Image (cartoon, rainbow, N blue to C red):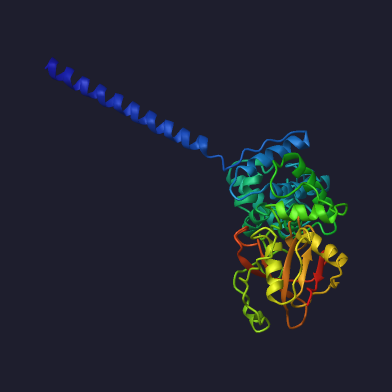
Amino acid sequence: MRKILKHYAIMLFSIMFLLVIVVGMIGNTQYQQCDTDTNGSNVVTSADKQETAKSVYQNLKALPNTTDAGIAAYLGNAEEESQLNFASIQSGQQFNQVKAMDKGLSGYAFGFNQWDGGRRVNLLNYASSKGKSWTDPSLQLDFALNNDGSDSTVLKQGLAMSDVSSATEFLRSKWERGGVGTSEKRINHAKQWYSKFAKGGDTPATDVADNGLNAATNEDKTSTSSNGCKVDTSQGMASSGAPVTQMPDNYKSKVQNTNFAVTSPSNTYPFGQCTWYTFNRMQALGTPVENYLGNGADWGANAKAKGYTTDTKPHAGWAVSFTQGAAGADPTYGHVAVVEALSDDGSHFLVSECNVVNSGSGTVSFRELTPGNGMIFIQGKH
């Protein structure tokens, strides 16, 4: 009998020991899962505005498809909205629960990005669901990126843009949807943040003025630059349509010469750049332009100096030079394209261009644009 009891005691002890191990493993697993659930951000704040901005920058930089320019644009808008203060309430007002939860109330914006109305209520509800304060910086960034409805998608579009000025204005008008008349201040803020945090890349911190460069310098930059005239294609670049590789149907009957693949052996511009394509296309149209007109932004002034006819209005068959940042043009080198046709009412025009889709590959694409500042149209020679 004692042997039987001893046998059962050993079995019971073994079972209890195994249960302790299993419970411990489960508990450890749950702890590990909780420990790694950070919602993708860990923002810290500081009385030093630069330290707060740096933390936001580092968190956003770790995400896919964000650029230094896009992050700077986000910071530039936030500085104008809240002075980078996650606990900010518009105009220094005090927190009032009844007012805060009133979706119809505006002018009572909260947080880093000054969410107002229904978006403010959504932020507060999201914070409550997470058991956190709405002033928590990591929660606000998570809300902005993932829980602000369709606006989160818009924010990610802005964060992926490659031009500081264009990204800042895009986020102001499409994501913040306010701040009319403050664009210049927001862009200046953004450029300052870009200059502090960017580690190089295609977009400079400030606009580059080439007015003092002579023709030889422009020629050298054009022939040696691999960046050429990269265009930001995130959201259509102030156009009525995003870049496409097939000509839009409403313009097909207007364009007679559709051989966009013609190349010229006399072309000295770098392969795949906007300047290379425009030279080829103008040759194919029988209204050639010459080599050594500089970067895309330089073509307008240089062509005029060389006797070409230029205009500020679009003409079919003419080249168009975009100054830095105009219609999404590269903020250093600008851009150049060919006007293929005008819309029926003359309010838009279609361009063919290169180095916009699949940069550097020689891919030709099309965009419908609206005439605006920073565009100089150039008639080729007959």
> What residue appears at the point 71 percent right and 42 percent down from the top-left corner?
198
> Could you say which is closer to the camera, residue 232 or residue 335?
335
Query: Which of the 4 quarters of the picture holds residue 166?
Result: bottom right
Q: Report x, y in % for residue 231.
A: 69, 59
Quadrant housing residue 363: bottom right
Residue at point 71%, 36% (across, down):
45
Location of residue 296 with respect to 59 vertically, above or below: below
Query: Quick one: 99 or 265, which is closer to the camera?
Result: 265
Residue at the front extreme of this rendering: 266
Towards the viewer: 177 or 370: 370
**Is 131 on the left or on the right of 33, as rendered?**
right
Q: Is residue 214 above or below residue 341?
A: above
In the image, is residue 260 above or below residue 344?
A: above
Judge by depth and name the residue closer to the eye, 47 or 344.
344
**In the rendering, at what x and y percent does residue 294 appear?**
78, 58
For residue 48, which quarter of the picture?
top right
| Quadrant in which the C terminus appears | bottom right
Q: Residue furthest left?
A: 1
Q: Quadrant of the N terminus?
A: top left
**Marker count (numbered):** 0
Q: Is residue 48 left or right of residue 1?
A: right
Q: Is residue 113 visible?
A: no
Q: Which residue is rendered at x = 60% and y = 45% of the image?
A: 63
Asked if 40 appears above or below 250 in the picture, the reply is: above
Q: Is residue 206 visible?
A: yes
Percent of width and height locating residue 94: 79, 44
> Residue 79, how many percent across, how many down?
78, 46
